[in-house]
Image (cartoon, rainbow, N blue to C red):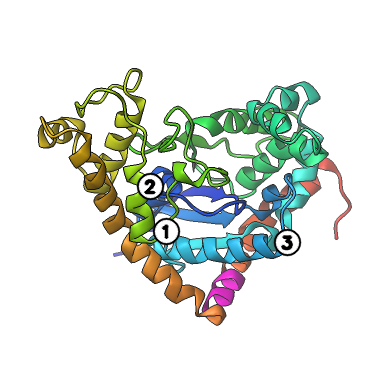
Amino acid sequence: MEETIVSKKRMLSGIKPSGDLTLGSYLGAIKNWKERADEFECYYFMADLHAITVRQNPADLRRRTMEQLAQYIACGLDPEKNTLFIQSHVHQHAELGWVLNCYAMFGELSRMTQFKDKSAKNADNINGGLFTYPSLMAADILLYQPDYVPVGEDQKQHVELTHTIARRFNSVYGDVFKLPEPYIPKVGARVMSLTNPTAKMSKSENEDTGRILLMDSPEQIMRQFKRAVTDSETCVRFDKENKPGVSNLMTIYAACTGKTFEEIEREFDGQGYGAFKPAVGEAVVETLRPIREEARRLLADKAYLQDVCRKGAERAGYAAEKTLRKVYKKVGFAAR
């Protein structure tokens, strides 16, 4: 009897190594990636090409890129089950990015919320890369013909533009690109800053009291949670609008423990924030402890990490080249 081979659906995502990975990065994205390795064919990359739209210290960028790879693996992304690679190691990203620039309209790019935000924050460096960032992001996605792209709410606009560019290209040249679906995780998808719970916990946040890094020590983590903003009530209750600080802490606690908001409310009924904040801190400490220890071990094994990079780039490059060759042929480039 012949065995039926069922091909897995493909998923792709990446994070810029422009800052250290945070608890928000883990609970909002990486934790979910790990759980999908058996169900999907997964491609995950360090988006270093995107990082240079803002000026970077070269040594820091190199260090963070390798640290991020080690942390991905420590978070449970097995390189044998997932294709892990560095974006700049796969030249097809930049090549397709240029082609898609020619199919993205000026008006579409100028309406991107992230371009407006970053322009305001980097007024002395509003460069072409910052403006055409979404075309490169479209290339990152479309190169691999994925079925799903796990993104945060703040990236939905980019996936919608990717669809627009892909449809425009397909309408001229036929069925070249698959249109992937955005996948938005529900619990823990948006972890907010501990000091400003109306803003997302950021990798590049200057005020470090607002964020938890994956490599923070238990003492640092507990200190950050003791400083976390709450409100004048003492009641542990989920109310995003009126109690953003407490609701953020409940979201983190739920993601680390698997408890529902109702269970958390019952657990801390009548106890106040003096008991609640340290409990959230302890849950985070225990969640991040094995990740931090394994990442340190991996960073000491440079040969292993370089081997993961090489193999990942080879696998990613093979998939990317198939799409790029098709695109080059369609637009009329002479064969190499």
Q: Is residue 144 above or below residue 230?
A: below
Residue under label 3, please give it: 58
**Is 34 in front, or is 7?**
34
Q: Position of residue 330 (x, y in %)?
A: 78, 43
Q: Is residue 147 above or below residue 17?
A: above
Q: Residues within 10 Å of mark 3 (few under 14, many from 20)?
A: few
Distance between the Cα atoms at labels 2 and 1?
10 Å
**Is 30 in front, or is 54?**
54
Query: Which of the numbered marks, if any, corresponds to residue 216?
Result: 1
Query: Which of the numbered marks, if any, corresponds to residue 6?
Result: none
Distance between the Cα atoms at labels 1 and 3?
23 Å
**Residues at marks 2 and 1 touching, judged by CB atoms closer than 8 Å:** yes
Residue under label 2, please give it: 224
Q: Residue at x 46, y 74 (%)?
A: 298
Disc 1 residue type (three-letter): Asp
Q: Nearer the viewer, mark 2 or mark 3?
A: 2
Secondary structure type for disc 3: helix
From this viewpoint, which residue is outermost toward the right?
A: 334
Q: Residue at x 28, y 49 (%)?
A: 281
Q: Is residue 56 above or below residue 107?
A: below
**Is 301 in front, or is 106?**
301
Which image quadrant for residue 228?
top left
Residue 308: say if magenta: yes
Disc 2 residue type (three-letter): Gln
**Is 240 in front, or is 178?**
240
Q: Dominant secondary structure of the magenta stretch?
A: helix
Which image quadrant for residue 53?
top right
**Residues at marks 1 and 3 touching, judged by CB atoms closer than 8 Å:** no
- Residue range (magenta): 304-311
Residue 323: say if magenta: no
Q: Nearer the viewer, mark 2 or mark 1?
A: 2
Q: Position of residue 293 (x, y in %)?
A: 37, 70
